[in-house]
Image (spheres, grey):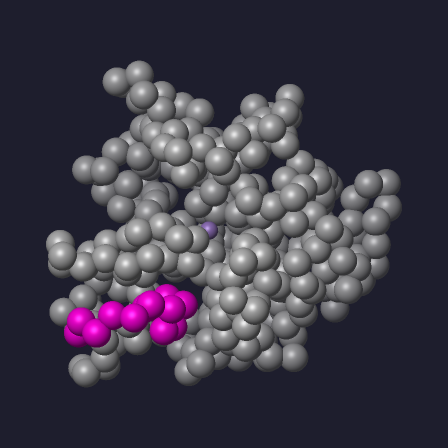
Amino acid sequence: MSGWDIIGDLHGHADALRRLLERLGYVRQADCYRHPQGRRALFLGDLVDRGPDIAGTVHIVRRMHTHGQAEVIMGNHEINLIAMRICGENGAPLRAHTSYRQKDYALTCAALGDALEDTCEWFRRLPLWLEMDGLRAVHAVWSPEHMQVIQAQRGKPQQRLDDHFMRSAFSKETPLFAAIETVLKGCEVPLPADQQFTDASGHTRQDIRVQWYRRPAANETLGQWSMPPGSIACSLPAHPYAHTVPTYPVTDPPCFFGHYWWTGPLAPLPGHPNLACLDYGVARSNDAPAHLPRLLVAYRFQGEHELDHQHFVAVSA
Ligand SMILES: [Mn+2]
């Protein structure tokens, strides 16, 4: 039976991707990975930035996409790359080239070289989510309300993200900005002005990413409700923010997402058998604590409504 092998964030880890595809039974023929039983791959975005072989990663995924062997949805790193190369009406890039972004940006530009412009054109036509064959896929958050906003501006799911769309998507006052932030980057709640914390990449933040698929219990803290679960220490009550997340009913189709550098076991989310995060931090730095995973992960989907931990397949970075 044919089906989908859903694959988490790649971030330039082409070597791990080759090993994962081979483990899943894909065979490379004429420079394109194919599955002998007709299975196809579904990539959850974040192909670029951070890793050692960004060009190789883009090449593998794009060949599979062009030859009908894969679907690809956009991650925040793809839309951010596009935004750093478009200027707004004030003449400045839509996404400012700040020093910490500049490192990733320079790495990706150097890696892609002459192929950069063409690769961005390809990215502009990627869907921001997919629903097909009994599954859903999105980079960060399945939020029907925000998806409606995006749909209304984009028209077809693969309509090119033109400069007009991008300018609106990167203007903080527009509904489209909030929609793109949520779907591609996560649901965040703002901390009071005197509170901040350091995230997994070492950046100081004043917003906490929360578990968008469920409301918090009455006595839960923001730390307990953070995403990935327990990733930050914060004892403020979560309840005042409960209404800010879309939630995800257990009766809805299975939904796969990436983005969060998951730290739990290779399994569906606890208490949510129709949800799985497939980003297990393949791009996590070598300095990260040894107990945190650095895995590239796939899920072999066979049409089931309740996801099965035995369908997870992982290779190390
Ligand atoms: Mn991401």
Residue 17 picture location, percent across and down: 70, 53
Position of 143 compared to 112: left or right? Answer: left
Position of 5 compared to 194: left or right? Answer: right
- Is residue 269 among what the camera can see? yes
Position of 59 compared to 164: left or right? Answer: right
Residue placed furthest toward the front: 287
Image vertical order of residue 154 relative to residue 239, above or below:
above
Q: Where on the picture, by quarter, is residue 300?
A: bottom right
Q: Nearer the viewer, residue 315 or 199?
A: 199
Q: Residue at x 26, y 64 (%)?
A: 245
Residue 93 picture location, percent across and down: 36, 24
Confirm whether the magenta stretch covers residue 312. Answer: no
- Is residue 257 among what the camera can see? no
Quarter containing the C terminus: bottom right
Span colored in magenta: 226-237
Q: Residue at x 63, y 40 (%)?
A: 54
Magenta segment, principal secondary structure?
loop
Q: Residue at x 34, y 30 (%)?
A: 96
Q: Where on the picture, by quarter, is residue 228?
A: bottom left
Q: Residue at x 77, y 64 (%)?
A: 23
Residue 70 picture location, percent across and down: 66, 49
Residue placed furthest toward the right: 29
Image vertical order of residue 232 relative to residue 8, above or below:
below
